[in-house]
Amino acid sequence: MTRKRRIALSVLGLILLVIVSGVVAWVLIGLRPKWYRPRQLSREDLLAAEERMFGTVADFTNASQMNEPFILELTDEQINDMLAVRIDRHRILPDYIADPVISLGNGAAWAGAMVTWKGKSSVVSVRIRPFVDSGGLLHIELDRLKAGALGLPENFLPDTLNQLEQSVTAKLTASRSNSEQAKTAKKNKDLMTRVFTALSGTPVPANFVTREDLQMAVEDIRITPGLLEIQFRPMATGD
């Protein structure tokens, strides 16, 4: 075999490899995780979910002001209903992100959403492992970032989180004229800022003030299939 023929075959093989790799990547990007099942709620279902959400928030508020330890329990169905209500009411996600889903597993949660970029849609997902250390700081570890079944580089995450934070906080604080709504919006924005700081890899204090003389601290976070448990304990504001 002549040298020119070997070079031609090598180039042809390289081209075929690139084409096959591109096709495989395209197929992998189009795959959906088995756990990714977006909630399809009618208008009546959304109203019912909103009522349940208000009840959960009221129960949490009451418990957090009692100066006693308590555990907040949320199923992945409750969490996904809350997401559906928030998105329907406030449109808190950027336009290119839709149908977010949380799936609770053994010690970690999977979060996924349909992302459309340059005409191609794919379920982008990430594994989330939150925990509170002995110093009372909240850590949120992210790994296994994927588009469909294709792994994404780690440097994809910071810019995406930054864009998501800007969109969420801007929409939470937009068009608020009533003073009580403004206060609630500020609290939501402060909470989201803290959460996104933890998501970016910087631990944050896992406590919040519930009344002038009391604050609650997150003592433990437990994730089991279908269930999230957050354990709270009271602490004096001076601690």
Image (cartoon, rainbow, N blue to C red):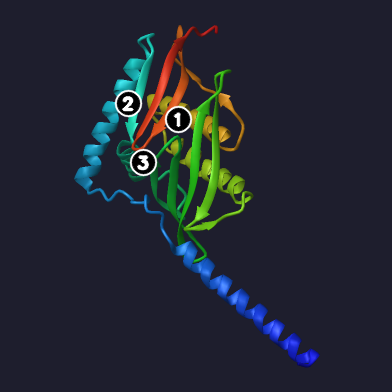
Separation of disc 3 and disc 1 at Cα? Answer: 14 Å
Where residue 185 sits: x, y (%)? 44, 30
**Mark 2 and 3 residues: CB-CB less than 8 Å, in contact?**
no
- Which amino acid type is marked by label 2? Val
Where residue 6 sits: x, y (%)? 75, 87
Q: Nearer the viewer, mark 2 or mark 1?
A: 2
Separation of disc 2 and disc 1 at Cα? Answer: 13 Å
Separation of disc 2 and disc 3 at Cα? Answer: 14 Å
**Mark 3 and 1 residues: CB-CB less than 8 Å, in contact?**
no
Q: Nearer the viewer, residue 46 or 204?
A: 204
Q: How busy is the neighbourhood of tag 2: few (under 14 within 10 Å), some, or many (20 plus)?
A: few
Where residue 86 sits: x, y (%)? 36, 40
Q: Element at badge 2?
A: helix
- Which amino acid type is marked by label 1? Asn
Query: Which quarter of the image is occupied by the C terminus?
Result: top right
Residue corresponding to mark 1: 188
Residue at left offset 45%, top offset 34%:
107
Residue corresponding to mark 3: 83
Where residue 77 sits: x, y (%)? 30, 39
Q: Is residue 98 above or below residue 202?
A: below
Mark closest to the chain's N terminus, 2 or 3 = 2
Residue corresponding to mark 2: 57
Mark closest to the chain's N terminus, 2 or 1 = 2
Q: Is 237 positioned to the left or the right of 227 in the image?
A: right
